[in-house]
Image (spheres, rainbow, N blue to C red):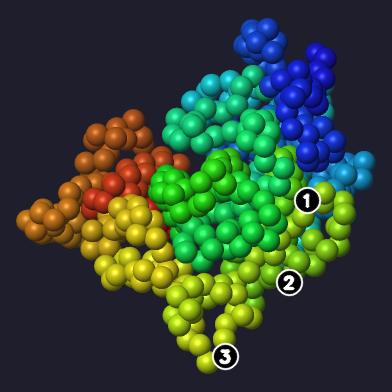
């Protein structure tokens, strides 16, 4: 089965080439309708791989050319080179691996020279991977190379060890179509579409800004200052792939971004959603985000504070610092091909009625700051948010999705052996909450669930775990929608209880 990537199609002719894509050409992995029909016919004889949300993000960025010059999932030679030198085997600058991870059983069923159908969770076929290599992942080595630690307090390391498959599969990709999105469709653009829009608007200098947070007044001011410094327009390009559990959900964030458009000068900015699942890889990730914005046609990249979100180690030291980001960007120098603007930390100066860089604050002037954690604590407690911190429209949207603690959902999970009294306690709690009538309450007693949700299951360890996970999923949906779930299963195994706790949190 032959396959050739299409670095540039007829559709790219006439599109602004002010900024060359990384590697020299914008890759397009989406095949013609005729080839798509052929692949769909062949798919009945191909093994399937159902992609996770994180893997769907990678496939979309590969297919659209955002990950140019990659034409598929990295082979072992490129992977090793990226870990060791931040470059592909041919010397092209590239800081992070882009590989398809699978569990051992699935990976061993694949052979080089064969093809596999790539599908979403609903089984919809998105493309075909032509397998070139399969190898076991040395997760310890990867963690040290990408994150500088094997400490699972680091969210990237924790994901690598707990969620990433045991093997990587490499090969060229033929994409039938991009993954389906049903929300904010008018805000989703490929690199080619963004480049065409810049050309239509006559924009020659564009700052790309990557963020995973809503923009408050300080971040808004930072983007305005960057536009002035670079004499450029703005591509507000928030990552909308998978977010961390404590982050504000994607839907709320995008509503906040749409509200902010009115606060920018007319015809000076474009809002577009970036379907990227963050790796939390600090300086390396900052470098990748800059390269990708070059593929979208940006001339400048604003380094946001999002790239230092990996937290701290056991001694309280940050896993990533602004200095490490700056050092790496300096080391790659001209190979980057896009000018990086440092993120200025701003504080609000009441006497000036404005945000200023810390170095420009007049001596003796009062500085007002509010951390994001403090902001969320105010929201949970129902306290007012200072006007200097955020725009009223942003506060309104976040408050709608994150009500005060007494209005949020919760799960009470009672466990114990048969006859221990967990069902009695659960029924007492259920009756009391129902009597108060402030929030909907659901009782998920072990016997009730066994009868209505898990009637086909026995009492082996495997079946007990399945039953508890089902209860946990239902409870998480109730909690997410601001109801109260009271659970009372036996749940004898700690790993399963911990998994349920994590899901509901």
Eyeballing the image, is 65 above or below 54?
above
> How many C-alpha atoms fall within 10 Å of the one at disc 1: few (<14), some, or many (≥20)?
many
* Residue 182 position (above or below residue 212): above
- Residue 401, horizontal then vertical, whole percent: 33, 52
**Of the numbered discs in the image, which one, if any, rests on residue 338?**
1
Residue at figure coordinates x 58%, y 20% from the top left: 125
How far, Cα to Cα, is label 1 from label 3? 36 Å
Q: Which label belongs to residue 238? A: none
Residue at 29% of width from left, 70% of height from top? 384
Instruction: List x then y, in percent, for residue 397.
Output: 35, 52
Q: Residue furthest left?
A: 435
Q: Quadrant of the N terminus?
A: top right
Q: Position of residue 105 (x, y in %)?
A: 66, 34
Image mark for residue 363: 3
Q: Secondary structure at mark 3?
A: loop
User: Sequence-wise, which precedes: disc 2 or disc 1?
Assistant: 2
- Marks 3 and 2, how far apart at CA: 26 Å
């Amino acid at each position: 089965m032959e396959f050739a990537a299409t670095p540039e199609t007829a559709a790219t002719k006439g599109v602004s080439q002010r900024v060359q894509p990384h590697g020299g050409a914008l890759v397009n992995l989406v095949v013609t309708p005729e080839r798509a029909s052929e692949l769909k016919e062949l798919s009945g004889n191909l093994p399937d791989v159902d992609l996770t949300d994180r893997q769907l993000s990678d496939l979309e960025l590969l297919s659209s050319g955002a990950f140019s010059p990659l034409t598929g999932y990295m082979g072992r030679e490129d992977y090793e080179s990226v870990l060791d030198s931040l470059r592909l085997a041919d010397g092209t600058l590239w800081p992070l691996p882009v590989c398809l991870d699978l569990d051992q059983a699935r990976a061993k069923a694949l052979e080089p020279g064969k093809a596999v159908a790539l599908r979403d969770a609903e089984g919809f076929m998105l493309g075909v991977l032509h397998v070139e290599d399969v190898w076991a992942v040395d997760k310890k080595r990867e963690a040290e190379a990408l994150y500088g630690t094997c400490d699972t307090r680091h969210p990237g390391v924790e994901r690598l060890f707990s969620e990433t498959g045991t093997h990587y599969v490499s090969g060229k990709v033929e994409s039938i179509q991009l993954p389906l999105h049903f929300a904010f469709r008018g805000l989703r653009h490929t690199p080619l579409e963004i480049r065409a829009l810049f050309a239509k608007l006559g924009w020659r200098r564009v700052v790309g800004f990557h963020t995973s947070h809503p923009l408050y007044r300080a971040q808004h001011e930072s983007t305005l200052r960057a536009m002035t410094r670079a004499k450029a327009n703005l591509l507000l390009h928030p990552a909308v792939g998978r977010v961390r559990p404590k982050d504000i959900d994607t839907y709320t964030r995008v509503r906040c971004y749409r509200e902010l458009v009115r606060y920018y000068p007319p015809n000076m900015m474009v809002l577009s959603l970036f379907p990227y699942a963050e790796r939390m890889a600090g300086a390396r990730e900052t470098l990748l985000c800059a390269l990708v914005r070059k593929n979208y046609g940006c001339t400048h990249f604003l380094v946001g504070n999002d790239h230092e979100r990996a937290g701290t180690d056991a001694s309280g030291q940050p896993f990533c610092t602004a200095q490490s980001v700056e050092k790496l960007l300096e080391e790659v120098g001209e190979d980057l091909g896009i000018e990086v603007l440092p993120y200025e930390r701003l504080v609000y100066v009441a006497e000036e009625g404005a945000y200023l860089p810390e170095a420009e604050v007049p001596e003796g002037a009062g500085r007002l700051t509010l951390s994001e954690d403090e902001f969320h604590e105010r929201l949970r407690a129902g306290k007012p948010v200072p006007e200097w911190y955020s725009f009223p429209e942003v506060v309104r949207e976040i408050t709608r999705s994150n009500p005060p603690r007494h209005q949020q959902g919760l799960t009470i999970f009672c466990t114990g052996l048969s006859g221990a009294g967990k069902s009695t306690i659960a029924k007492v709690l259920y009756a009391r909450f129902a009597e108060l009538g402030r929030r909907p309450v659901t009782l998920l007693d072990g016997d009730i669930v066994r009868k209505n949700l898990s009637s086909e299951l026995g009492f082996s360890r495997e079946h007990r775990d399945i039953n508890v996970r089902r209860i946990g999923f239902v409870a998480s949906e109730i909690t997410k929608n601001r109801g109260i779930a009271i659970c009372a299963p036996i749940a004898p195994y700690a790993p399963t209880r911990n998994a349920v706790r994590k899901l509901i949190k």
